[in-house]
Structures are given as C-alpha cells and as structure tokens.
Amino acid sequence: MKPVALESPVSPNHIIRIAIKQLPTKRIISDFVETDEDHGKVNGTGNSSFVTSDDAVEEELESNDSKGLQMGSNGNNDVNNKDVFHDREIFDEDYKEMKNSMKIYIYPHPKNHPFANILLPVSDKSEPGGNYASESYFKKSLAKSHFITNDPSHADLFYLPFSMASMRHDKRIGVRGIQGFVRDYLFNISHEYPYWNRSGGADHFYVACHSIGRTAMEKAVEIKVNAIQVVCSSSYFVTGYVAHKDASIPQIWPRHGDPPNQPPSKRKKLAFYAGAMNSRVRENLVRAWKNDSDISVHRTRLKTPYDQSLLGSKFCLHAKGFEVNTARVGDALYYGCVPVILADHYDLPFADILNWRAFSVVVSTLDIPILKKILQGIKFDEYLSLQNNVMQVRNHFQWHHFPVDYDAFYMVMYELWIRRSSIRIPLS
C-alpha cells in the first residue's frame, strides 16, 4: 500500500503558540554523546530553612514589588506576560479532551521475547534511574495508563516501544547495533501489521532521552521523516529533528518527595554552574567567570552538596554540553532556581505550551562575556516574577511512580495529542 501523508489537526492558535521561539540562531554543532558522569547527584535536603508553602514567595512579591535588585537597569528578558502558558484557556480545554478521548496502541510483545528488556517497560518493582530516566518513566507510565487501547482501530497514535538506553547497554546490540535494530524492528512491524503502511508512519511515535537517538534512525529514515520523535536532544539546527512535527521531552534526574521551597531572600548567590568541560560553551563560561564573586562556576562536579548551591542561587546556568539538553533545567526548576539557558537552537521542552520567557532567561552563547550585566539588569520585582513562575511550572517537570495530573507524563501526552493525525484511514 502506498504511504499516505496525514494532515496535522493543530489549530491556528496552536500553530501560533508552536511558532513562538525564544532562542538565537548562531551556529553550534555537536556530534557527541553526553554521559551520566556529567550530572552531579543531588543529596537529600532536610534544611531547616525551607518553608512548606509559597507564602514566603508571595510575601516577598508583595513587599518588594517596587524594589529594585540594586543591579542596574532592566535586562533583555521580557516578563511583561507573566502567564506561564501561551494560552491557558486553550490548554485547559484541550487537556480535558485529551484525557477523556486520546488512545494509544502499543505494539505487543510477550514477556519471554528475546528483547523484552528493550521493548517492555521496567518492572513495577524497579524505579527508573540515571540521567536518561525520562524515557523509562514515560514507557512505564503509559503502559499503566487509561490511554492504552487494545483495539488499533480506536488508536490516535501508535507507540514504537524500543528503548535507546536499554539498547546501549545490551551487549547483543550496543551503540553500533542500534541503527540495525531499529531498521529491523520497523521492517517487522510494517510486514506483520498494516498500521504503519496506511499512514507512512505519520501516526507513530517513539521516545528517546539519550542523544544516541539522534542518529539511531539513519537506517530507518521513514521514522525520522514521518514519525513523531519525542526526544531530549531537541536541537532544531541539527538535521533529523523537525520542530513542530517532533517534540522535546525534558531530561530529568529522578527525585522523590515534594520539592523544597527556598524563598528568594535566602538566595544570596547571583548565578551557579557546575559540570564537566565537554563543550566550548562550558569552557567559555568557566573561563569568563571562574574568578567572579557573584557568579559561581565550577569545571567539575562539586565536593559540596549540589542541592545547596542550587537553593542558594537566584539563577542556575544551563550550559550546553555535547548536546543542547542536560538535566540542569530540571534541577533548577525543582530547587526553585530561575534557569538561564545557554544553549543555542534548543527547542525547549513544552515550548508550544509554556511561555519560557515567563520563568527563564534565554541568553545567546555569544553573550557569555556580558552574562553578569544581563542578569544584574533584571530588576528585583522582575526576578521575583520569574521565580514565582518557576514555582508554578515545576510540577510539569516531575515524573511520578503513578502519574499526577499535569506532571511530565501528562505534558508529553498533550504534546502528542496536538500532533496526532486528524484523518483516519479505515483498514480494508
């Protein structure tokens, strides 16, 4: 059967939201893979100075509304639109419809399949872990959700359940064998089932957090071109990722329990960064600010608790490594620190839903030498607005053993919902 191209159901308002981009377009190329060692493990908090609600933030918003940060004039971050959603009304309406009607068909594989470790979710007895846990959390959450249908005729989308992280560590496959595995998997499902061929794969998707997923489709170009790629390494400069067709998923380090609430008044450091020197951007950042008293940068993992540095800083720097994505954005949000994005061409997670300018600062990597001036140029009331919005959005960047409304799982599901195909082709 000849593949049929499907139209997108995304409404004009969605298209407007999706088209909003905040990032500069200077050329940055990366061809490597980030490793777990780049991310600092977070120790437990237990700090007696944490508050148990947003009251402290709200009080500071009221008492400091007219104060300046004593750091110069207004910076380049527009926070006039303080709503964290591009269009909250449309989101709320669509979200309810998505929860009530969306259906996903997962290609079935028995528990005794020779590659069950790659195709099936992790056991309920084990918890996803590591720097690329988002991939496993999504698969596990989806498999247990009400979105699943066993009737393909009712499915809005079809899930290709292979795991990039599992393939990397499987000695039968390894990094060099991933492309061949994906090619063979596509061949098998397209010959055993009719669903891929009726749409050319436009109503199929896969999820990958490790950056190796960017090259995994080289022997299965149909997936790269037609299917929805839900990936952490979402650079709209690099070939293979198609913004608006594909979707960005946040890279989140697994954590348990409620996030801490540290009021702005106790965040004494202007900005913080720590991590491996695996990109020119990071090298330039450390070189420019290593001796500064307000911006704390480190070229290795900290010997002191990582969480205390995040809690003690107003801004937390996300500097691209081998790829545009790292877990530092999730780290910053979890600890109530305003993220500063130093990653040109990063198609930020949920950017067609969330207004990143309301809770982050996006800076061109060429402006690293004037980073301090930019951050000091943000007035205190503007910073408080950014930080308060961080507290509002951080629930969207958390995974749970059992998904919670509006958490990362449901946000990814919504991204898929607005990318689903509106034309249904009946099976003959």
Image (spheres, rainbow, N blue to C red):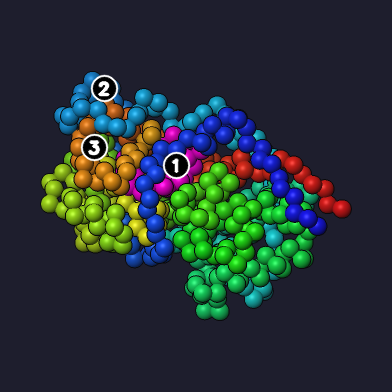
Between 348 and 414, the one lying in front of the other is 348
- Please name which of the two marks, 3 or 1, marks the residue nearer to the observer: 3
Is residue 221 shown left or right of residue 29? right
* Residue depicted at 71% across the width and 54% down the height: 200
Q: Is residue 199 magenta?
A: no
Q: Is residue 72 visible?
A: yes
- Which quarter of the figure is the N terminus placed in? bottom right
Vertical position of residue 283 compared to residue 360: above or below: below
Residue 349 position within the rendered picture, expressed as x and y whole percent measured from the top left: 46, 45
- Callout 3 environment at 10 Å: few (<14), some (14 to 19), or many (20+)? many
| Label 1 residue SS | helix
Residue beneath label 2, please?
65
Quarter assignment of residue 284: bottom left
Is residue 415 shown left or right of residue 131? right
Residue interval drawn in magenta = 337-356
In the rendered structure, which disc, 3 or 2, sits on the residue that comes first in sequence?
2
Residue beneath label 3, please?
375
Which three-letter amino acid code belongs to the residue tagged 3? Leu
Contact (Cβ within 8 Å) of mark 2 with mark 1? no
Type of secondary structure dominating the magenta stretch: loop
Residue lying farthest to the bottom in this orientation: 172
